[in-house]
Amino acid sequence: MSTDATSLTTEDLEFLRRPLHGLLSVAAGPIPAQPRPVWFEATADGTVQLFTGPDTLKVRRLRRDPRASIVVAAPVGERERWVSIAGGVTIERDGAHDLAARLAARYWDLDDPTRAADLAGILAEDQVRLVIHPETVKRYAY
């Protein structure tokens, strides 16, 4: 069943706390949209955040039009389920490195020296935190 809302439910948050990739699209991007896979974190207050470099194309586009959407789907082999979140985005200078470290631990095995070095490289660079404030949430679960 597909439903619409303006905020994330407890079930949505449980689903979004899994190590799944989100597909991010920004409003000022090309038409048709060309989403990019991203790591993300759903927060207890119902926002969704991710990190990126401060000079990336997505940040430049968000400065022109601060709206984005992210779609997260269940992986192959599971029953069909997805959540789509759209809303305004704030670009935050604080917390990006902490977020990157949390997400790396969620998505990677940091005991692997290659992955640990990858994380060190991310943390050595300037990062910003993108926070999506949901205005529209759509979901489907079979």
Image (cartoon, helix red, strand yellow):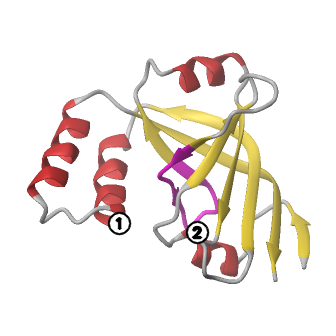
Residue type beneath disc 1:
Arg
- Quarter that holds the C terminus: bottom right
Is 44 part of what is drawn in magenta?
yes
* Foreground pick, 129 / 142: 142
Q: Quadrant of residue 137?
A: bottom right
Residue type beneath disc 2:
Leu
Can residue 8 be seen here? The reply is no
1 horizontally vs 64: left or right: right
Q: Quadrant of residue 83?
A: bottom right
In this rendering, the answer to whether 102 lies above or below 142 is above
- Numbered badge on residue 106: 1
Q: Which residues are magenta?
A: 37-49
Work out which residue is located at the far left of the displayed protein and give it: 113
Q: Where residue 75 sits in the image (x, y, percent)?
A: 59, 71
- Numbered badge on residue 16: 2
Give the mark nearer the N terminus: 1 vs 2.
Answer: 2
104 horizontally vs 135: left or right: left
Measuring 64% from the left and 62% from the top, which residue is drawn there? 46
Q: Where residue 105 sits in the image (x, y, percent)?
A: 28, 63
Q: What is the secondary structure assignment of the residue under circle 1?
A: helix
* Foreground pick, 82 / 126: 82
Q: What is the secondary structure assignment of the residue under circle 2?
A: helix
Measuring 19% from the left and 36% from the top, which residue is drawn there? 121
* Foreground pick, 50 / 107: 107
Can residue 78 be seen here? The reply is yes
